[in-house]
Image (tube, rainbow, N blue to C red):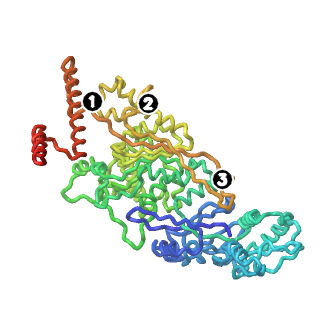
Amino acid sequence: MSSTTVTLYEQKPSKVEGRIRYLTSEINGKKEALREYGSIETHATKAGHPSGSAGHIGFRIMLVGLPATAAEPQTYLGCRTFSLPKFGTFPSNLLIGRPYYLTYELLNRQEGQKDSGLRIVPASEIHADTIAEEKAASNPSGDDGFIIGEDGVEFQLVGEDGEVFMRSNRETIDDNARQTLTHEEIETLKREGTDAGKELIAKLMLSHTGIEEKTAFSLAKYKLLKAKKYLRQFSIFPLDVPMLAHWAIYEKESSKILELREESLALIGCWANVHFAEDYQPALATESTIESNGGRWLVVDDTGGLLVAAMAERMGILYSENGDEPPVKRKLAATSLDLPSDNSTEDAQRESHSHLVEDVQIPYASSNTITLIHTNAQPNLSLLRYFNYLVDDPSPQHPLSSHLLPISWLQLVNPSLDVTYSAEPPYQTPAELHALKSGKRGTYYRKRRRWARTKHIADTARKGDFTGLVVASSLDPVSVLQHTLPLLRSGAPVTIYSPTIEPLTALADLYSTSRRTAFIQSPPAEFESLTQEEINSWQGNGDFPLNPTLLLGPTVQTSRVRQWQVLPGRTHPLMTTRGGSEGYLFTAIRVRPAEGKVEARGKYKRRKEGEAAVKTETQSIGDSVENGKQDLDDSKKRKTGVEDENPATLDNDIAMNLESTS
């Protein structure tokens, strides 16, 4: 039986290897899933918060299949109450200690109680229809009144002629209930809320005047539709990125995430080679060490954080670290503010102030990072709040707080025009800070930290040497590559997603073979006075908006997963699936053109000219003919077993034989 799905999730421990296992099965009682993730109580304890206690990490649910007002995921900290609009409420303590992937039924609220209770629906009750069909097929002449389930969840529908549409241990519903129900009567039955909606569904089906004309398949679909609307059952699932993408596509405005589907997210992760690339050796996140470390991806995300979440899940930095294990301690690129020693002077402090990191901390890792380019004052990462990450107030314990580096386009292209980057707060000595009030001292440190973080991110990003580029934006991809392509290292993959194909086909034409050949044969005139680094960062002209020699293998592709109806003789794709944009992907590889001209090397013989060439050719032909004849004779002799002998000797032997016989 299909039921409304409620998704409950919490912090999953991040794996050091960066591997995340998806558990999306809806079958009740999956033992492997329970061993993998345990129970809700176990995860709450591992996260550092005992069951029922409030804390920063708590339980969160997502309602799938309910009305749009109830479908948005919400966060619940500690012991709270879950509210299902139009159905009722129940406390979260009823779920503590129970595993995922179970189906629950919301019971009727008893008198004197504020909330409703829950009942675990057994698997035999969920699959009662299948069990009934199998029993009917195995025993066609048996009794029609066999029992399905323990409490009779299925409905026994009997027509006027005594035909049984559905069987259970329920008493036969009176034929008077076959009258068509009005809207007022349906609302009355809903307010009564008896039998978890089963009685209402049974009466609705009996009130259908043409129910006896329906086929078995049509009747099952009609029953499923009513069960989704009125049956008060839900299932518990841990939330992951594919489930969040499915909710954003089908329950919310898909245009906010550029209609980025699950299969497109998987293709982006594969073609961009997004993986765990942590540097286990403690290293300082300074400008001198950034270039030597790998695992740095440059991202342009206009999907509300869905693309960043998918990449972070592959990199192992989306979920908070396990509470049972101590967090990986990384050395920061700065030291905290220390009071100067007695022999230090203000001039020495001013000299040390010339370095970026002196009185503030830069809590960013040197590898396995995501550098996010955004257009606003702050990046739009609203979907990351479902994974316990807030952009305006990130938790220091969350991995994204040290592995996600946001930078604006202005700070990347021309940082001198950015106020935060260029306006450095004036440095103050410890004596001056001691004289300030606590509020002004806090403001000073806050501004200094903000400036140091911005300068560190901008300087390291402009140095380049990124592992890959991933773009999912409504911006023109040509303008995006003009500023981001020079920042990639050789061999870095480039992956660009677009809901429509037109921008990507125009981009692929700029890197076509014909355009690259024309560029190499007649390069622009300004290339003669440019160095190799200036050529790599060349902004293009009217004929060549981009340097076509920097990318190889441009490809535009698409992929769409379709649901199929699998029935005997009626197997076909679902005709009522969701439409929308198809979604296309541009992929290529960043290369570095060879400096100077390419020269061929190897053994090379100059061809002879004139009569000498003709004589040599004639001689070689004659030699080949003679060699061919000799080979043919040798092969014949080998077949007959006759060796090459002297003819005179052969005649003498014959004569001697004749004399002896005479």
Q: How many marks can you see?
A: 3
Q: Nearer the viewer, residue 407 or 249?
A: 249
| Amino acid identity at mark 3 | Thr
Give the residue at x 47% y 45%.
471
Classify mark 2: helix, strand or loop.
loop
Q: Position of residue 115 (x, y in %)?
A: 68, 76
Of marks 1 and 2, the one in the foreground: 1
Residue 169, visible in the rendered structure: no
Above or below residue 108? Residue 314 is above
Q: Which residue is mark 2?
A: 545
Q: Position of residue 52 (x, y in %)?
A: 54, 76
Q: Earlier in the sequence, mark 3 or mark 2?
A: 2
Q: Nearer the viewer, residue 59 or 554?
A: 554
Decide: few, some or many residues near mark 3? Use Cα within 10 Å; few <14, some 14-19, many ≥20: few
| Amino acid identity at mark 2 | Pro
- Asked if residue 224 lies left or right of residue 613, the reply is right
- Asked if residue 454 lies left or right of residue 135, the reply is left
The label on residue 577 is: 3
Classify mark 3: helix, strand or loop.
loop
The answer to whether mark 1 and mark 2 are in CB contact below 8 A is no
Q: CA distance from mark 1 to mark 2?
A: 23 Å
- Asked if residue 262 lies left or right of residue 14, the reply is right
Q: Which residue is mark 1?
A: 597
- In which quadrant of the rendered image does the N terminus lie? bottom right
Q: Residue furthest front?
A: 662
Above or below residue 286? Residue 26 is below
Q: Quadrant of residue 17?
A: bottom left
Q: Position of residue 543 (x, y in %)?
A: 44, 26
Q: Earlier in the sequence, mark 1 or mark 2?
A: 2
Q: CA distance from mark 3 to mark 2?
A: 40 Å
Q: Earlier in the sequence, mark 1 or mark 3?
A: 3
Decide: few, some or many residues near mark 1? Use Cα within 10 Å; few <14, some 14-19, many ≥20: few
